[in-house]
Amino acid sequence: MSDMEALPTPSRHLLDDGRRTRAMVWIMAIMIFLTVLAAALGLGAARSAGSLDRELAGRLTVQIIGADKDAQQASVAKVVAALRKDPAVTRVAPVDRARLAKLLKPWLGDAGLDPDLPMPAMIDVDLRHGDTADVARVTAQVQAIVPGAQVDRHARWLAPVRGFITTLWLLGAGLVALMAVATTAVVLLAARSGLDTHRDTIDVLHMLGSTDVQVARLFQRRIALDTLTGGAIGAVGALALTAFFQARLAMLGSQMMNTMVLTPADWAILVAVPFVFALMAMAAARLSVVRTLKSQL
Amino acid sequence: MANIVQFENVGLRYGTGPETLSDISFTLSDGAFYFLTGASGAGKTSLLKLLYLAQRPSRGIIRLFGEDTVLLPRKRLPGFRRRIGVVFQDFRLVPHLTAYDNIALPLRVAGIPEGEVEPPVREMLAWVGLQDRGRALPATLSGGEQQRVAIARAIITRPELLVADEPTGNVDPEMADRLIHLFGSLNRLGTTVVVATHDFHLLNRVPGANMMRIDKGRLYDPTGSLRFPPRRPDVPPEETS
Ligand SMILES: Nc1ncnc2c1ncn2[C@@H]1O[C@H](COP(=O)(O)OP(=O)(O)OP(=O)(O)O)[C@@H](O)[C@H]1O
Ligand SMILES: [Mg+2]
């Protein structure tokens, strides 16, 4: 059966190129431009979420409140000593009072420098992993030494930010999915109208013994070509824009924004978008043509 | 001789109209030559369409190459069609392809390697006297030239069955003779040929050819010979108007 499917190169011209519409190329250019941008947004957000999680996962702050400064210092020393022995803990660092005062300056003003002002003592703790079990154990340990001590996960403070980033990620993924659906719909419409435009030629091909797959292949080839041409235009535009934004992000110097920097793998995914869309368009065209032809004799 | 085609009580109705063809029964012998005649509108083209699988009958049985075509699944149609050469009454040349590419079409559809396409196409162009017109688009060819391209396209694969619908309608008598001679040569090489025509001059150009006549959608043998015994006795006798 395989020789029945073969249709060598000159078949490229079996469908009248004069009747070919350029519109498809531009539609594809726009579709893929938007898709690549949406994908870049999604990937950037995913990157950011990932690095935020890595940053925050194992970070805790122990807060010890007590009116008596000396008792507080003693508790801090005991907690620090205990946590240093814990294998899951990689770093234990009491935050010294001067630094705390500096951090609180916007709220307390110079009053923070008053050594008599009661202030909670704080200890930064980094865990090897961010496992909930480790966190629970450290918390229990601390509270056994200093009842009433508070252990906060940094991740909790940044939960709203993390949520927003997840929303961005989902938005990017959703947009890509929508663009894929829209592109498929455009291809289906184009294939159907193409079948009408070239009805006479297709009839003749059928009468000469062409299979539906051979006919579909003519459309597949054109649609793939249009998608790749348009895709090249759209993708180059979107990649340039993404590169520009990435450069701006780096210039902002914001730690938060820097997490959105794309990796080489991300860039590879973005470059692959037009090719994936071309494959998708080909599959859609083939399906549509073969299905439509099936109803004919 | 084996039968290459067998029609049994075939009827054809377009849409909900009256039957265009009724009670058509005949057999075609492998390797024979047939003329199909009849007035305009009698149903010649309709009958040929059934033969080259462009139309399914509304009733009856059509056997082609020994197989029932009515029940043939769609995916087997291309295989059958590649064994049949068709000269359409309206030529059906692909308008944006040159004469050369139109003639090459059946070979390319059949997946013949490109290197093996040129010699037969050149040969066909020469046979129909168009060796200098290979690059011409159909629109720049005369009606007769287009018809010859259509004929070349139909016979280039040396089909087992050649169906030609008014293949000489647009050419001068001399060219008509030549084309019929061409069909005769092909026939001698083993192709079963069916030519629909109302050009009575052609009929005696092929020695030993069989005649079929169709009138108002019913088929019978005007010569009364036993070559096409009606399968059923109720095929009407001469009722010429
Ligand atoms: N696709 C169609 N739909 C409806 N009616 C049709 C169709 N094709 C043909 N007919 C009708 O069937 C009848 C036979 O037509 P057909 O084309 O078979 O005649 P013909 O013998 O080939 O005539 P001609 O010598 O003029 O080519 C005519 O009355 C025609 O109007
Ligand atoms: Mg006709």
Image (cartoon, coloured by chain):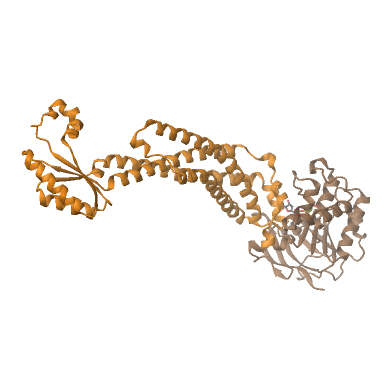
Chain colours: A orange, B brown
Residue at (15, 53) in percent of width and height: A141
Residue B6, percent from left and from top = 75, 68
| Extreme residue toward the bottom, this view | B1
Q: Is residue A2 above or below residue B129?
A: below
| Residue A87 x/y as whole percent | 23, 55
Tell me which residue sits at (16%, 51%) in the image.
A82
Q: Residue furthest left?
A: A68
Q: Nearer the viewer, residue B47 or A231?
A: A231
Total labels drawn: 0
**Does B85 appear above or below B9?**
above
The percent position of residue A173, horizontal first and vertical second, equals: 41, 45
Location of residue B84 by image quarter: bottom right
Instruction: Classify residue B132 as left or right of residue B94.
Output: right
Seen in the image, is B177 located left or right of residue A222? right
Quick check: B20 above or below A163?
Answer: below
Residue at position x 90%, y 52% in the image: B176
